[in-house]
Image: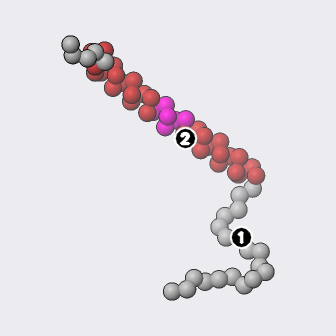
Amino acid sequence: MMAAQTPKGTNEKKGIVLTPEQARSRRARNIAIGLAVALFIALFYLVTIVKLGGGVARLPA
């Protein structure tokens, strides 16, 4: 099956084109989401360490 092609010489953009303000807003939102996920992972890690106790790091003698 052949893909549909646009005629040569057309300057047609596909998809949604964001304004610079929208692009900045999207980037800020993505950074905020990334930080929230990282903090959530750190919280789970710390809660796990606290629940298991300090004896996890000790090797049996």
Q: Position of residue 7 (x, y in %)?
A: 72, 84
User: Tag 2's secondary structure?
Assistant: helix
Q: Neighbour class for label 2 at 10 Å: few (<14), some, many (≥20)?
A: few
Q: Is residue 20 visible?
A: yes
Q: Position of 1 compared to 12: left or right?
A: left
Residue shown at 78% from the left, 80% from the top: 9
Q: Which residues are magenta?
A: 35-40
Question: How far apart, in angstroms, are the residues tagged by discs 1 and 2?
Answer: 29 Å
Residue positioned most to the bottom: 1
The three-letter code of the residue at mark 2 reads Ile
Q: Neighbour class for label 1 at 10 Å: few (<14), some, many (≥20)?
A: few
Q: Position of 11 compared to 59: left or right?
A: right
Residue shown at 39% from the left, 30% from the top: 44
Rendering quarter of residue 50? top left
Q: Position of residue 48 (x, y in %)?
A: 33, 26
Position of the C terminus, as image quadrant, is: top left
Q: Which residue is mark 1?
A: 13
Q: Which residue is mark 2?
A: 33
Q: Position of residue 30 (x, y in %)?
A: 59, 44
Image height check: is 32 above or below 12? above
Whether 15 is among the magenta residues is: no
Q: Position of residue 40 (x, y in %)?
A: 45, 33
Residue shown at 49% from the left, 31% from the top: 39
Residue shown at 77% from the left, 79% from the top: 10
Q: Earlier in the sequence, mark 1 or mark 2?
A: 1
Closer mark to the observer between disc 1 and disc 2: 1
